[in-house]
Image: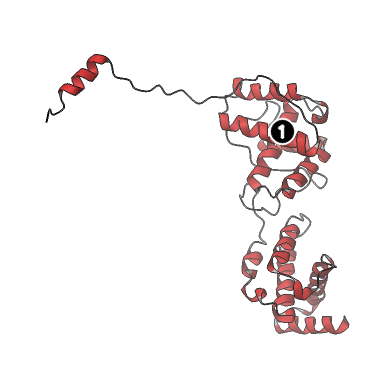
């Protein structure tokens, strides 16, 4: 093991890494290896590295430069020391550039987005077509308010969404809908509400907020996901509630005289 790390340190010197930073490079590489205790380094693939960096990127306590350092440490590990075939073609530059913080509204796996409520309140983008509850002052305030009151619900919701590898946009939307649902019901624990409560909220979206059918459907999907996947509760039939509908388009139908007039202008041969 000592010889292994001695060789690694020699590789870092080739890149003129500052002496005071070398020990941190070693630590970054060690952390990665410890995260894969049962997999020999020679058997690692680019997917192992991607998965690890994705997880590392969600650590809100990690600074940009620390994330960049971790990427560089793994590059030296696999390109120069292990010499894995895939490593030479791996997009190290992409990962180093992605060390910059992304805004919460970014459509990719934004590094700061979705921090579990146990660390700090969740922030996200307001779903299109929705309006904040009258007690809210901003997009993030309604989510911060609900996730601070019920951090376990939001933490478990985000965990279930990511375990199913849903897109970041789906995660943003479902977190938003749960928060708005809680605020609408005056900060009651959603675990103590029932299908009637969902019914009431869906009608409110249509009757008072005039949302589109797709927006109402998204709200329903988000709440059903929370109850079924997170709380393991089957709410059964939600009953009848008002559906948002698209405007009806009546077909243009000609009268008998109009058809006759049209036919009279057609050539006879």
Closest to the observer, 241 or 145 = 241
* Residue 58 in sight here: yes
Compared with residue 173, is residue 19 higher up or lower down, i.e. above or below?
below
Q: Quadrant of the N terminus?
A: bottom right
* Residue 145 in sight here: no
Residue 211 position, x and y percent, is 58, 27
Compared with residue 56, is residue 90 higher up or lower down, i.e. above or below?
below
Please rate how many residues cluster around mark 1, counting C-alpha atoms within 10 Å: few if below 14, some from 14 to 19, many from 20: some
Residue at the spot 69% in from the left edge and 37% down from the top edge: 176
Residue at the spot 57% in from the left edge and 29% down from the top edge: 213
Q: Quadrant of the C terminus?
A: top left
Picture quadrant where residue 48 is located: bottom right
Compared with residue 48, is residue 223 higher up or lower down, i.e. above or below?
above
Residue 125 position, x and y percent, is 64, 41
Colour logic: secondary structure
Picture quadrant where residue 177 is located: top right
Q: Which residue is mark 1?
A: 224
Closest to the observer, 228 or 75 = 228
């Amino acid at each position: 093991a000592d010889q292994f790390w001695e060789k690694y340190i020699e590789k870092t010197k080739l890149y003129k890494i500052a002496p005071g930073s070398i020990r941190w490079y070693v630590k970054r590489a060690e952390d990665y290896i410890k995260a894969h205790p049962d997999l020999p380094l020679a058997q690692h693939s680019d997917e192992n590295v991607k998965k690890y960096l994705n997880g590392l990127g969600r650590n809100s306590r990690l600074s940009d430069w620390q994330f960049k350092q971790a990427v560089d440490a793994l590059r030296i590990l696999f390109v120069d020391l292990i010499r894995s075939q895939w490593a030479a073609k791996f997009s190290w530059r992409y990962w180093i550039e992605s060390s910059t913080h992304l805004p919460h509204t970014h459509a990719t796996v934004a590094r700061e987005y979705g921090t579990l409520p146990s660390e700090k309140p969740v922030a996200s983008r307001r779903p299109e077509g929705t309006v904040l509850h009258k007690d809210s002052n901003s997009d993030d305030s309604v989510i911060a308010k609900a996730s601070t009151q019920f951090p376990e619900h939001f933490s478990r919701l985000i965990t279930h969404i990511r375990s199913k590898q849903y897109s970041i946009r789906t995660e943003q939307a479902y977190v938003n809908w749960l928060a708005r649902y809680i605020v609408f019901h005056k900060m009651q624990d959603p675990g103590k509400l029932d299908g009637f409560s969902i019914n009431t909220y869906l009608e409110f979206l249509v009757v008072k907020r005039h949302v589109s059918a797709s927006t109402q459907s998204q709200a329903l999907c988000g709440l059903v996901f929370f109850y079924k996947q997170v709380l393991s509760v089957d709410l059964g039939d939600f009953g009848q509630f008002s559906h948002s509908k698209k405007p009806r388009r009546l077909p243009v139908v000609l009268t008998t005289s109009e058809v006759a007039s049209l036919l009279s202008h057609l050539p006879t041969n």
